Amino acid sequence: MFLLAVPSAVAAPGPGPAKTDLNPRPAVVPALQQWEGGTGSFELRKHSRIVLAKKQVDELDDQGAQLSTDIAQVTGHKLDVSPRIPQDGDIVLSIDPSLADTAGGTRYAEEGYTLTVTDRNVTIAAPTEKGVYYGTRSLLQILLLDDGRDTVPVGTAVDWPNYKVRGFMLDVGRRFFTADYIRDYLRLMGWFKLNQLQLHLNDNGFKGDKPSWSEVQAGFRLKTDNPELAGLASKDGAYDRADWDSFEDTAAANGVTMVPEIDAPAHSLAFIKFRPSLGLNHGDSDHLDLSKPETTEFMKSVFDEFTPWFRSPDVHFGADEYTVDKPRYKDYFNEMAAHIRALGKHPRAWGSLSVMAANADGYDRDLTLNSWNNGWYGPQAMKRDGYSFINTNDALLYIVPFAGWTESTSTTSGSRMSSPATRAWPPATPTFSAPCRRCGTT
C-alpha cells in the first residue's frame, strides 16, 4: 500500500512547546492508503446530524439511515438524518463524480473516497455511492477504537482498494449455514470492505472407506416450489426465494455482490441422489454421466430455475475435478458457459484444464476462472491461454467448513452485535478446521 509520510511540524525556537504533534494514521482495516494528520479532533455532540448533500437525498438516504443506526450501535449516539445545510458537529455525505486521485486511479474512481475531518465537521465525499459507503465504514472503525470518547482525529484520508475483487467463498453445500448467519457475514464483509461473497450451493462429502456413495453426505441448498424439482433441496437446510432475496438486499446494503455457484459435473452427488440415472456407475458416484444428453439438459433446467433469483452479473457453474470422459467434459464446459450467457449472466468456473485437457484449444474463453490449484490450472497457464481469472489458491485462500467447526457466539436473529455500551463491533465470527478440498483430510 502507498503510505504518505507526514513529518511533525516544528515550531520556531523560543518560548512554548518545541513542536506540535500531528495526528497519527487511524488504525483502520484495511489500512488507509493516504493520511495527512492535523491537530485536535472532531467530537460527536448532542445536536450532531448526518447531512446529505443537496440533490443527492435519493441516492444517499438509505446510507444515511444505515450510518445513523451503526453509529448508535458503536457509540450510543442516535443522529438524525437531514438534507439541510451542514452545521458544526455534523457528518456530511456527498457524491462527487468529478473527484479523482492519481495514485488511486480506476480503483479510486469506482470505490474510493476522501474523508476530511476538522474540529467542526466530518465530510465523506466519493465519486460513487459505494465509495461513500466505504468511507462510512472507516469512520465507524475510528469511532469504535477511540476508547469511548466519540471523537475522530483531525486530518484527511484518501483511500481506495488495491484489488477489484476482494472476495470470500462459503461452502454451504457440505455444511449448512443459517440464513441469519449469511446475512451476518455480509455485514461483516462490508465492515472490512470485501465486495464479493460466493456461495458454493451444492457439494458432498468424501467416500473414504464407505462401501457406497449412497452413504455420503450431499447437499443442495436452494428450495423452489417448482414440482419438477421437488425433493432436490436438502432436508437439513436450504434457502427459499425469500431467503435469497434477503441475502441480495443485505449484500447491496453492505457493498457486496453475491456470486452463486452450482457445481457440476463433479461434486454432484446431490443431483445424482435426486435423479440416480444421471450418475456414473449406475448412480454410485458423485460424477454425472455426460454421455447422456439428458444430464446436461437437467443441469440447464436447474440454472433455468434459479438464475432469475440472482442479481449478480456473474453465475458460477463449477466444472472442477471431473476426472473422466475428457472429450464430453469439453462439450459440457462450452455448452454450460453458453447457456449461462443466454440467461443474461457472465459465466464463471473453476480452473481444471491442466488436468482435463492437453491445451485450451476449443474451450470457451469468454468466462472468468477461479485459480484454486496450480496443478489443476494455475494463474500463469490461465494468463497464457487468455482467461480472466481470480486467485482462490487452496493452499492459502480455500477453507472447507468441516464437522469440527465451532462458533464463538450463539446465533441470534439479525446482526450478531453487542449492546452499544460494550462497543463490540463487528460481530464475532466462527472458526474452522481446514481440510483439503479434494481428499477431506485436515
Image (cartoon, helix red, strand yellow):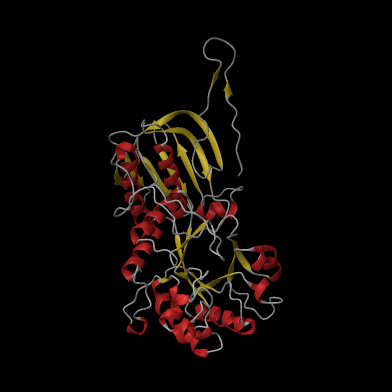
Residue pictured at 51% horizontal, 69% vertical: 206
How many numbered circles are shown? 0
- Asked if 371 appears above or below 68 in the picture, the reply is below
- Asked if 23 appears above or below 70 in the picture, the reply is above
Q: Front-most of 286 and 141?
A: 286
Quadrant that contains the N terminus:
top right
- Asked if 440 appears above or below 343 in the picture, the reply is above
**Could one spot residue 95 in this view of the protein?**
no
Q: Is 315 positioned to the left or the right of 417 in the image?
A: right
Point out residue 316 in the picture as x, y percentages from the top left corner: 51, 71
Point out residue 266 in the picture as x, y percentages from the top left corner: 54, 75
Residue pictured at 30% horizontal, 53% vertical: 412
**Could one spot residue 153 in this view of the protein?**
yes
Residue 327 lies in what quarter of the image?
bottom right
Residue pictured at 56% horizontal, 65% vertical: 439
Quadrant that contains the C terminus:
bottom right
Q: Front-most of 364 and 302?
A: 302
Point out residue 392 in the picture as x, y percentages from the top left corner: 57, 60
Residue at the top extreme, as displayed: 15
Point out residue 208 in the picture as x, y percentages from the top left corner: 53, 69
Residue pictured at 50% horizontal, 53% vertical: 111
Q: Front-most of 196 and 294?
A: 294
